[in-house]
Image (cartoon, helix red, strand yellow):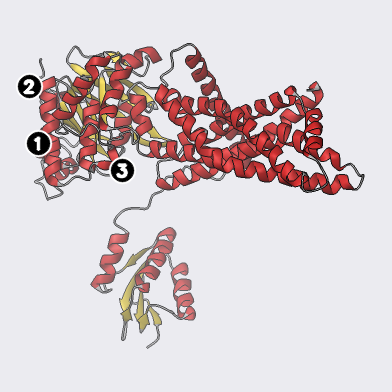
Amino acid sequence: MSAHVTFSQAHSEVLVVSLSGHWGKELDPVVQQELEQKLREIDGAIKLEPGNDFSWDSHFPVYLYSCMRNVKNQGCSLDLSAMPVAVRKLLQLANAVPPNTSAQSSEKRPFAPFAGTIKEAYGLLAFLGEMVFATLRLITGRSHMRGVDALTSLSQAGPKAIGIITLISILVGMILAYLGMIQLQQFGAEVYVANLVGLGMVREMGALMTAVIMAGRTGAAWAAELGAMKVNEEVDALTTMGIRPMDFLVMPRLLAMVIMMPLLCIYSFVLGIVGGAAVVLTMNMTPRMYISQLLTAFGPDDIAVGCFKGAVFGLLIVLAGCRSGMECGGSSAAVGQATTRAVVSAIVYIVMADAGMNLLFFHLGI
Amino acid sequence: MSVSSGEEAAIEVRDVNLQYGSRLIQRDLNFTVNRGDVFVIMGGSGCGKSTLLKHMIGLYEPAQGEIFYSGQSYTQADEQQRQTLRSRWGITFQSGALFSDMTLAQNVALPMQYAGVDRAEVDDRVAFKLALVGLAGFEKYYPSEISGGMCKRAGLARAIALDPEILFFDEPSAGLDPLSARRLDELILSLGESTGATVVMVTHELDSIFAIANNSIYLDATLKTWLDSGNPSWLKMHSRHEVVRSFLSRGEAVPDQANLDKGAPGGKEQGKYTTLSKGDSEE
């Protein structure tokens, strides 16, 4: 039998609501509206009663709970004493603890994204400042860094990354060669492909591609490592032991990255040039021509620029990776977020820094 | 409020408010931990026990109030003084917080290396500390190769590496089977007794509380303050708050202590409870 509701006001102040039929899933909206309308109008006591053939399922207490909340907002009370014991018990349980009224901390404020950016920049600068202090402590010999940790980090940042850097560098060299070939053929200036590959790898692509690989490979791994240490309270343990986490955890990684990045960049230059050669030598160019063009293409200052960029990118990878690791929240999901954030922010920092440095070097004439 | 009440107090918490982010967790905390006490911070889940411990070990700054150690304020100390104070503490974290890329021996040796313990001495001391917690022969194992209970004990060995004056424990028996939990309690108690260290412990395990604590504080989550402090066995019978008596009686119905004052929580009478706590605090 479908749900049905009748109202009677036997005593002048109490409205008796009689529910008959089945009250549960797929409640007739007309009945629902009728009841809600009545409840909205009333401002005295209301008593619910089971009527003819009254039956209910688990949807009924849910509906009743929302009705009770509305009625309570109006300042009325709902008398359930005639309802089945199970319904009463469920609602008693639901109402046993008053709802939390304190405001949640993450309120939506105007300009929230803007404030977030400023906060982010502030946090970044603060972490950078701490890194500077830690570096000064390292130079003056007062650091808590352990040599063995620096060696481990060196191995993580260097030899273990060689394979993927080899592959990517050769391919980038080949890409540059093809790109140059298509454009320069139009002017019959194919010979300058060597210049493009050489200068392109040394000044730009070598450092950039190495940095992107290291950000994805090592930076992310470090963010996850530090994040897990944070979740596991290991960072707290260090602090309480009087060991500065900045010295103990971040400095070995910074040292490793700043040493390794220029070396990996040089390795990448060489392989990029080899990759370019593989393309160029199949197209009317002798090795002698390629090498002699290369020698005129770039000098030691270009190599220095490439290596310098590499070192700066290394610093930025550590900044992004270690910062998101150290500021990781307390849950396991936070470790994943920290890793993602490490890679994304590292790549953003790298490209921004690259653009800035190019501008600077152009105006300085380097 | 920077007066300290004499030699006996190892830790004094004065008018401290705890905040986590912008959320107030506890307010007006006032209690004293006497030297040699086994002090338990108890209360229901989410009442701020661990947060209080993190404030006491200097990981968080109290939003208000001060914490004193042997009469010296930690809150107002500079970094150098804090470092000195911290070097007298040993802390065991909930999970053990061992460094996963180090063996147990390296974990225990770490604080010694930074405290400038003689290199030749370190190995012997590490072996002894690991033996004390029943992990002799596990020096070369990594934390991932031993059980959770063993990790906790190894964490304890690391905490006592430098013979601390105060030992802090965050839920030492959480997640352990009753037997291991009991053994860990006994270990904590006998270490505390034999080294004379003050023990501060966060727990809600009643077995642990009655087995080892001689002083305690009860934090309430809804009122956001402490309700009572004193010896847990005494509180179980005589606390002026029914919720404390009920907590200590595993939630069973407790007789109403009608003759006891049910005054405002966090009142000023905490002195009369702390005096009942401990008889043998002199060393």
Q: Is residue A81 above or below residue B65?
A: below
Dot 1 crowding, Cα within 10 Å, few <14, some 14–19, many 20+: some
Determine whether, in the image, residue B60 is placed left or right of residue A178: left
Determine whether, in the image, residue A206 is placed left or right of residue A58: right
Residue at point 7%, 20% (across, down): B280
Which of the two discs, 2 and 3, labels the residue nearer the N terminus?
Answer: 3
Q: Do the residues at pointers 3 and 1 share their chain?
A: yes
Query: Would residue A308 be visible to someone looking at this image?
Result: yes
Q: Nearer the viewer, residue A24 or A77?
A: A24
Determine whether, in the image, residue B212 is placed left or right of residue B55: left
Q: Nearer the viewer, residue A347 or B208?
A: A347
Q: Nearer the viewer, residue A37 or A251?
A: A251
Q: Is residue A154 above or below residue A36?
A: above
Circle 1 is placed at which residue position?
B211
Q: Residue furthest right?
A: A187
Q: Position of residue B134 (x, y in %)?
A: 14, 33
Residue at point 88%, 47% (across, down): A185
- Residue type beneath disc 3: Gly
Q: What is the CA distance from the residue labelled 2 to the residue labelled 3?
A: 32 Å
Q: Do the residues at pointers 2 and 3 share their chain?
A: yes
Tag shown at residue B279: 2
Instruction: Classify the position of the C terminus of chain A by image quarter.
Output: top right
Tag shown at residue B46: 3
Q: Are marks 3 and 1 in contact (CB under 8 Å)?
A: no
- Residue type beneath disc 2: Gly
Q: Position of residue B149 (x, y in %)?
A: 20, 41
Q: Position of residue B111 (x, y in %)?
A: 30, 22
**Numbered disc total:** 3
Q: What is the CA distance from the residue labelled 3 to the residue labelled 1?
A: 23 Å
In front: label 2 or label 1:
1
Instruction: Classify the position of the N terminus of chain A by image quarter.
Output: bottom left
